[in-house]
Amino acid sequence: MSGSECREASYILPIRATSTAHVSDLANYLNGLRHVQLIVVDASEESIFAAHAAAFAPGIRHLRPDSDIEGANGKVRGVLTALRRCSHDKIVIADDDVRYTQWSLRAVIDALDDADIVRPQNYFDPLPWHAVLDTSRTLINRALDGDWPGTLAFRRRFAPFGYNPDALFENLELVRTVRARGGSEAVRRDIYVRRLPPATPHYLRQRVRQAYDEFARPLRLLTALSIVPLCIVRPSLAVVFSTLAIVTAFVGLMRANGYRYFSWLAVTAAPVWVAERAICAWLALYERARFGGVRYAGRIVKHAASSPKELRRKWAV
């Protein structure tokens, strides 16, 4: 059965590629998906767009972002474009580095029977050094309120008009939008979805931008900002923070049999990630004060994500 023969959910892939190196791998992945209506919204330059069009199977709908949709976040503009064409209430959004299996795709779609928005769990494969470090972040989040993967699934009726295209932390914005409209969220740490690691230069460029996301979660931002000053005043606290990071990452490793998918190296690297985030939080604060926002895709973006209170007020009936 091809992806065009079964339409029980819609799978949205917003993409803006800068080369054709990935085309064959991405096409092989998408052409093999089942049980979904596939919509690729492609903001790549013309030659790359044409390469995608030639490689994708006929059942895949491949189109440009709608010109009337504005906003700072190109990914969200792509999602909003696709939502206008979706045939189903069940929606899966994924980045171009996400690699569902038939099992994991089925699992996340089925999870929408019991929740209105679902956060599955990404894991990196292969695992270069920076993916180990980023996995430390994943493990710490798993031990707390759940990780933020490169893919979500939600019921369209709880976000019929989409979500704010100016939000930098777009997944948090979508989750908060669904919840503000009365939807329920499921953090499914047990649904594992492979993710390809980024190239090292791309990873490095994302450090401050990802730290800036925490402007949408002030308590986390303040926690990150406090680490460096506290360690300067009392250097012995570095040992305390390191121990807490390792213990928290270990808890994340063990939850829902995570040790089957995550490297133990990520547990030992957790203090390094905490130190990186602590430093990048100050750099993000500097960019906010100096430029009014963080540099993203050639522009300055201020808005990380709307608060739950703002969204409840916006969607109040």
Image (cartoon, rainbow, N blue to C red):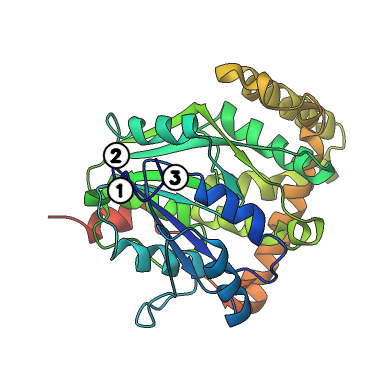
Measure the C-alpha gap from mark 1 to mark 2: 7 Å
Which residue is situated farthest in the left direction here?
A: 317
Name the element at disc 2.
loop
> In the rendered structure, are the residues bearing label 1 and label 3 in contact, judged by CB atoms less than 8 Å apart?
no
Q: Position of residue 303 (x, y in %)?
A: 49, 67
Disc 1 target residue: 178
Quarter the C terminus occupies = bottom left
Classify residue 200 as left or right of residue 315.
Answer: right
- Where, by quadrant of the figure, is residue 231 drawn? top right
Residue drawn 67% across the image and 63% down it:
284
CB within 8 Å, label 1 to label 2: yes
Q: CA distance from mark 2 to mark 3?
A: 11 Å
Secondary structure category for the residue under label 3: strand
Give the residue type that dot 2 points to.
Answer: Asp
| Nearer-the-camera pick, 168 or 156 | 156
Judged left or right of residue 58, residue 19 is right
> Which residue in the protein does label 2 denote?
116
Identify the mark at residue 152; answer none if there is no mark.
3
Q: Is residue 61 above or below residue 6?
A: below
Q: Is residue 218 visible?
A: no
Q: Position of residue 80 (x, y in %)?
A: 36, 66
Residue type pointed to by label 3: Leu
Residue ID at (42%, 69%): 77
Q: Earlier in the sequence, mark 2 or mark 3?
A: 2
